[in-house]
Image (cartoon, rainbow, N blue to C red):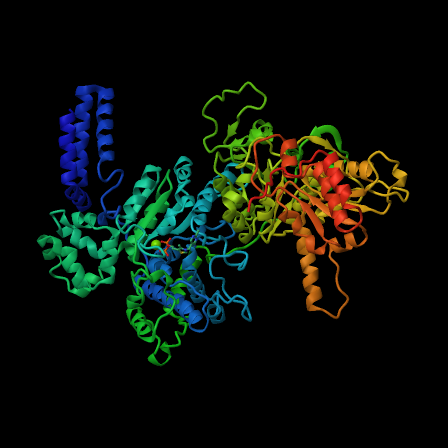
Amino acid sequence: MNNTVSVEKKEIYDSRSGIAARVSGGNGDKWSQSLQSVFELALESQGPERTARLLEKLADQLRAAPHGVNTPYLNTIPPEQQAPFPGDREIERRIKSYIRWNAMAMVVKANSTTNVGGHISTFASSATLYEVAFNHFLRGRTENFPGDIVYFQGHAAPGMYARAFLEGRLDERHLQNFRQELAEGGGLSSYPHPYLMPDFWQFPTVSMGLGPIMSLYQARFNRYLQARGLMNWKDEPKVWAFLGDGECDEVDTLGAITLGARENLDNLIWVINCNLQRLDGPVRGNGKIIQELEGLFRGAGWNVIKVIWGTDWDDLFARDKSGLLLKRMEECVDGDFQKYTVEPGSYTRKHFFGKYPELLELVNHLSDEQISKLLRGGHDARKMYAAYKAAVEHKGQPTVILAKTVKGYGLGEAGEGKNISHQQKKMNEKELREFRERFKIPISDDVIAETPFFRPPPDSPEIKYLLERRKTLGGFLPERKVTAPPLDVPKLDAFAEFFKGSVTEASTTMAFVRLLTILLRHKGVSRNVVPIIPDEARTFGLDALFKDIGIYSSKGQLYEPVDSKSLLYYHEAKDGQILEEGITESGSMASFIAAATSYATHGVPMVPFYIYYSMFGPQRVGDLFWLAGDIRAKGFLLGATAGRTTLNGEGLQHQDGHSLLHAATIPTCLPYDPAFAYELAVIIADGLRRMYAEGEEIFYYLSLYNENYAMPPMPGGVEDGILKGLYKFKPGPEILGKGRADLPVGQDAQQRVPDIKAHIFGSGPIINSALKAQEILAERYGVSADVWSATSYKLLRTDAIRCQRWNMLHPTQPPKKSYLEELLAKEQGTFVAVSDNIRTVPDQIAPWVPGGLFTLGTDGFGRSDTRAQLRRFFEIDAESTVIATLYALAEKGQIERQVVEKAIKDLGVNPEKIQPQIV
Ligand SMILES: Cc1ncc(C[n+]2csc(CCOP(=O)(O)OP(=O)(O)O)c2C)c(N)n1
Ligand SMILES: [Mg+2]
């Protein structure tokens, strides 16, 4: 049998082109009938098990063969199965040409007077992909339908603007100010940025790879909303993502595609613009990107539709009975195909067809010019229509369309198919004329050098056609509309239990879990809460929620969980509320973003709480954090197990001391570092109010820690300070008498200097270092130190900068004072800050602290050890805080330097210990 299989395999491969050609020529049925009868014969004579083994063996050999999981380098949809194109091709072509022209003109104009950049070639290659989709498939939002969700390729933005111009949504001034957003009257953002154009763009895509991963999780989130009854679509929206072939090298693009098949996301369609080029040159000069992607997607369980060749090639394939045409296609690598684009038709005749006499003959009837114009599939509206139609009708799997195109299509000498194509931003007059002629743009010679925009009048057949198409499809796209109703968020008293404090020790993570439980029972928000976890629920104590609210699974729970008898069993359910993402921080962030923008995308406000190991937050998926700002995400990110010393034992890779700084860089993010349960409650309650009752488009980042300690009751009147970033938590003792601070330890406190005053800002669990230092300073050194809780250095800084700037620009008016300045103006003394984060976190406010701020922090790499050891190592424990405070006082001449030296000795700190900072 082995022999037979090899013979079959050899025949199949030797004549593969022939088979493929015959299949595409319409003889496929005969082949499948023959194979079917062989299969039935085998079943009869060998029985099912042996037949299955034989088939499996055959499949293995096929997989190991040069093509692997690929199909031949042909269109997936043969011409005879192609759905007919229903549109008016002539009008659509003219519309597309005008859009092409305006998209090009925007960039050329912008760069003729300024150097602001822009891209022509990406859209030039994808114009047909978009136009067919806009005229026939992409559905806008209507009263009863939320609209399809579309991720546009970032560098194709000029094409979307140019279309909106024809649609009458943008005017000439907008186009004129492309990439000049600060120009009078505003301009258009370089790429899709909802932050900058909140009525237009929905999804930022320009950082390669983020569009793809967001679209995957968005498609899954749509199913989640439906499963939980939060949306009820008769007609499910599709999620479309237009991507680049170079973009597929990003791990974010391909790293999660199995989710699509696993979740049967037939609501998801990816359109990959395979122009074979990226920025510097070919994507796979020595291979074939389309085949590589096909293999990957097929392997991952997707429906793959290749659109390689245009209609012109159908006739050539049909006439080629030898299979040589396909063989020649398969011999060529992408570098060759790029060359055929750049060179004239005579070159292609000689080097491509000329390899085999039969092929030369096949194109005898074509002139060189006709050969050079043989279209690739992605430039053929009929082929693209058929592909889209097949994609929207496909059931059970997501679809990827691999459309072959030419980068810079239509630019001719200016950059068509050239390696410099991506960067081409200028066109000279000759190139402009050629472009005009090629696409028949009615612009006269005398103005062409100015690259004027062209828009036919509103009653022209083109504009009427275009508007009618969009009306039929439900409205314009892209368009961002916020229609979500406010939520009835809990008032502060819903969290009253946190304000009483507790002697039972708890961590802020435990407090958060308790708080989440309260929200899950609050009638105003319970259904909208979306807990998101990347396989770390047990670490944070969130497994307590498994049973109550369930883990979302589109398949429900097909098995009996091993822990079914326990109270907290692993409970998966079709309407589960938790998104348990497994080990994918990028995927979890993509889910967070889908939930965090549901207020705008679906008109349903969702409240995501994404809790994760803080070290694997912005440090790992920082670009998605940044995107969360741009996309106007609302929700809570919770960096748990935070703190370079609080997370003991785990060592260098796990101990986070800088996420707060990352978070501080995102303009719409409010980072908080709460120390106590009541602070957490005040911050979250206010966040809910601001985002979901008042409609602010901001999000929160909170550090959560895993150290247990007694949670104190909330002092009176501190809510405002908690939210603004700083308040006095515990004043230092009043120290009487006129003694000297350099007196030996144990001497009568009455004799110590009363007016040596210090202030220690502490955050997170390190506030406990500050509190202990407060005691030591008072008892042993006669220094009274007030302890403050610093909940957000970023917010203090932003407010201070705002006032400083106003004062600078209004120099003769009475100066404004920031919250921080007003607060500290009432205080005397020396200021010290201690944190489980790097010093740069507290240093953010240093310029506004009277007399400066002396900071202690955890700069350097973490270590595996106990908290006590780590805090001594990084010099943020109570003893180190005492020494730092005394030193800061000595620096100001308020105490003798010998006092500091003595304290170092008394408190057992080794002055020669290794320094944690490195360079
Ligand atoms: C994460 C990221 N890295 C790099 C870039 C810079 N960049 C912009 S476009 C581009 C090439 C895009 O090629 P491809 O995806 O093939 O798109 P095409 O323009 O060819 O359609 C690069 C490298 C980026 N935008 N994002
Ligand atoms: Mg490309």
**Residue 445 picture quarter:** bottom left
Q: Position of residue 897 (x, y in %)?
A: 76, 45
Q: Which residue is nearer to you in this view: 292 or 857?
A: 857
Q: Position of residue 745 (x, y in %)?
A: 82, 35
**Residue 800 placement, left or right of 119:** right
Image quadrant containing the N terminus: top left
250 vs 396: above or below: below
Residue 375 is at least partly visible in this image: no
Percent position of residue 639, x then y = 59, 40
Q: Look at 42% across and 73% down and name the residue there.
A: 112
* Residue with the most extreme bottom position: 446
Q: Residue furthest top?
A: 565
Question: From the viewer's perspective, is residue 21 above or below residue 116?
Answer: above
Q: Nearer the viewer, residue 895 or 142?
A: 895
Q: Position of residue 659 (x, y in %)?
A: 58, 44
Q: Is residue 460 left or right of residue 915?
A: left
Q: How many marks?
A: 0
Query: In the displayed structure, would residue 49 be above or below residue 606?
Result: above
Q: Is residue 4 above or below residue 188?
A: above
Q: Quadrant of ligand 2?
A: bottom left
Say whether residue 418 is left or right of residue 654.
left
Q: Nearer the viewer, residue 742 or 760?
A: 742
Whether residue 254 is visible: yes
Q: Give me the residue at 50% from left, 57% from top.
A: 193
In-front residue for pair 860/297: 860
